[in-house]
Image (cartoon, grey):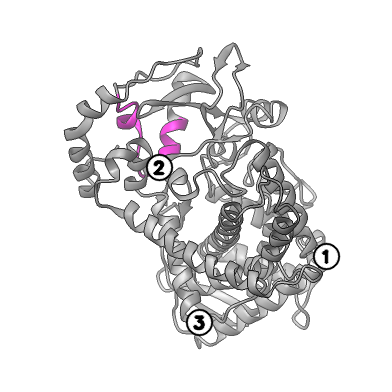
């Protein structure tokens, strides 16, 4: 833990004042027979062994001493860490149901209270996931209709970038707006202009929330929520921005309630409202207002942030390695040309581009610790007894960066996904979308977005950096639940 950071130092100092009182009030007996791990301090757990700027790296380092299955303590609560390909495969796939719960870190609990498709458990989660998958497919996910929407939005993004008139600019906002419009069209039934002030405010809120999830303040909140509720910090702004997003989405839901027609559902919200109407006399129905709001928020956030962040990072990496950018363009010229829009059918004919996109996802490692899992019952696993409700960390980074799985795990190398003949090759160790029952439900949409947006941009522009391309740092600016790229300005030179 880096105590040279003034924010962290202040927070730890304030925490120390209240530790003894809280410890006396909140003693909790240990249950089960957990895997061994590093010695933990009372109440503080292993916080001083965690690098708040990159906790996943601390966990990987601990695995070198304690093995692929071990326990760390976050405050008073244990977390079982699954590290490495074999452990992850056994836990998330072979024992998928056992580890399929969603552990509600205090920050997530405060925001969701266990509602919504991303943060629910049990029968609620099963119903919401089944409904969400079928509804997303009904509105085009993985189909030609959504492909056309992405193509149209990619063309609008190209126009927005051309309007920069080859002046240096930050990719963050236009790319986030473009990607968000895809999920907005599915969930809300509309898209927004990039200059729309309300839309821009929403994008800023999402950026603050994403950055907040990786801040030391929020990580401390997840360890000591009762104390942090009384202290200032970025966690306060994150919760406020989440409340603002909820307010916006609630207004959209209310508008849908006033105008929807059961026979003609326009989007995800309408489809949910139809189920609410059909089950209004069922006291056990999960189709209630709380699940509607949180599911829409989950889809809106995830559908905006992960793909847009990956695209921003992809451009940054391709600017750092211009020879790779040029090689993709050569493949675009050979397969697509300059007179038509890229299509999903082109991907199978473009193995190098496909390999680069996969390698971008592998290298950036966007959710290095996954979203927290939880055991669904008391389970025996590799000789240990892990109690029901235990926090489980599937350390995706330990697979995506494993020396046993990749030739050059710490370097950007598209050859990881190419065979000796230059054909694309899959890898079981590619877990960028996680694995098992909690795998990202928007995976097929994200894959389409990444390919179509990136190829359309590179068909239209050469991207160059304001600084020397060799000086671009592609390590994360922040790392926590999500990782964020560093900010650079680029030139987009029309081809």
**Dot 2: what SS?**
loop
In front: label 3 or label 2 = 3
Verify CB contact (< 8 Å) between mark 1 and mark 2: no
In percent of the image, x 53 and y 79: which residue is there? 492
Q: Residues within 10 Å of mark 2 (few under 14, many from 20)?
A: many
- Between the residue at mark 3 and the residue at mark 1, the CA separation in whole angstroms equals 33 Å
- Between the residue at mark 1 and the residue at mark 2, the CA separation in whole angstroms equals 38 Å
Verify CB contact (< 8 Å) between mark 3 and mark 1: no
Whichever of callouts 3 and 2 sits on the residue coming sooner in the sequence is 2
**Dot 3: what SS?**
loop
Viewer-proximal residue among 21 and 462: 21
Residues shaded magenta: 43-60
Name above or below for residue 136 compared with residue 97. Answer: below
Tell me where residue 7 appears, x and y as whole percent: 23, 49
Whichever of callouts 3 and 1 sits on the residue coming sooner in the sequence is 3
Tell me where residue 431 appears, x and y as whole percent: 64, 42
In percent of the image, x 51 and y 12: which residue is there? 33
Residue 490 visible, this orientation: no
Residue 463 visible, this orientation: yes
State which quarter of the image contains the N terminus: top left
Tell me where residue 196 appears, x and y as whole percent: 50, 82
In percent of the image, x 75 and y 45: which residue is there? 426
Residue bearing the label numbered 1: 345
The image shows a total of numbered marks equal to 3
């Amino acid at each position: 833990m880096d105590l040279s950071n003034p924010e962290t130092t202040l927070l730890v100092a304030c925490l120390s004042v209240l530790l003894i009182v809280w410890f006396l009030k909140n003693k909790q007996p240990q249950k089960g027979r957990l895997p061994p791990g590093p010695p933990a301090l009372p109440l503080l757990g292993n916080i001083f062994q965690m690098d708040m700027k990159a906790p996943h790296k601390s966990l990987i380092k601990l695995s070198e001493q304690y093995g692929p299955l071990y326990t760390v303590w976050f405050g008073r609560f244990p977390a079982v860490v699954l590290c490495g390909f074999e452990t992850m495969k056994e836990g998330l796939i072979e024992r998928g149901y056992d580890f399929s719960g969603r552990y509600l870190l205090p920050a997530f609990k405060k925001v969701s209270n266990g509602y919504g498709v991303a943060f629910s458990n049990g029968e609620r989660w099963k119903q919401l996931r089944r409904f969400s998958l079928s509804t997303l497919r009904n509105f085009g996910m993985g189909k030609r209709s959504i492909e056309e929407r992405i193509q149209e939005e990619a063309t609008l993004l190209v126009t927005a970038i051309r309007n920069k008139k080859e002046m240096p600019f930050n990719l963050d906002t236009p790319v986030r707006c473009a990607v968000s419009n895809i999920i907005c069209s599915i969930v809300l039934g509309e898209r927004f202009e990039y200059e729309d002030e309300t839309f821009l405010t929403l994008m800023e809120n999402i950026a603050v929330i994403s950055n907040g999830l990786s801040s030391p303040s929020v990580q401390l909140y997840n360890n000591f929520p009762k104390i942090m509720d009384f202290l200032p910090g970025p966690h306060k702004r994150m919760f406020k921005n989440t409340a603002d997003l909820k307010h916006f989405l609630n207004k959209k839901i209310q508008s849908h309630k006033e105008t929807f027609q059961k026979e003609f559902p326009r989007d995800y919200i309408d489809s949910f409202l139809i189920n609410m109407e059909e089950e209004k006399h069922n006291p056990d129905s999960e189709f209630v207002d709380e699940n509607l709001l949180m599911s829409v928020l989950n889809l809106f956030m995830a559908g905006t942030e992960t793909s847009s962040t990956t695209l921003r990072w992809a451009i940054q990496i391709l600017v750092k390695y211009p020879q790779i950018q040029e090689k993709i363009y050569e493949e675009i010229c050979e397969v697509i040309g300059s007179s038509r829009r890229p299509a999903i059918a082109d991907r199978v004919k473009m193995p190098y581009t496909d390999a680069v996109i996969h390698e971008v996802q592998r290298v950036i490692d966007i959710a290095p610790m996954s979203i927290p899992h939880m055991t669904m019952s008391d389970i025996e696993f590799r000789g240990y007894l892990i109690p029901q409700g235990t926090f489980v960390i599937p350390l995706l980074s330990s697979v995506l960066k494993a020396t046993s799985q990749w030739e050059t795990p710490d370097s950007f190398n598209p050859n990881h996904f190419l065979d000796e003949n230059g054909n694309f090759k899959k890898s079981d160790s590619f877990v960028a979308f996680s694995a098992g029952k909690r795998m990202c439900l928007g995976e097929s949409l994200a894959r389409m977005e990444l390919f179509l947006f990136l190829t359309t941009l590179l068909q239209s522009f050469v991207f160059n950096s304001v600084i020397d391309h060799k000086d671009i740092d592609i390590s994360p600016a922040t790392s926590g639940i999500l990782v964020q790229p560093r900010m650079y300005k680029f030139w987009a030179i029309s081809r």
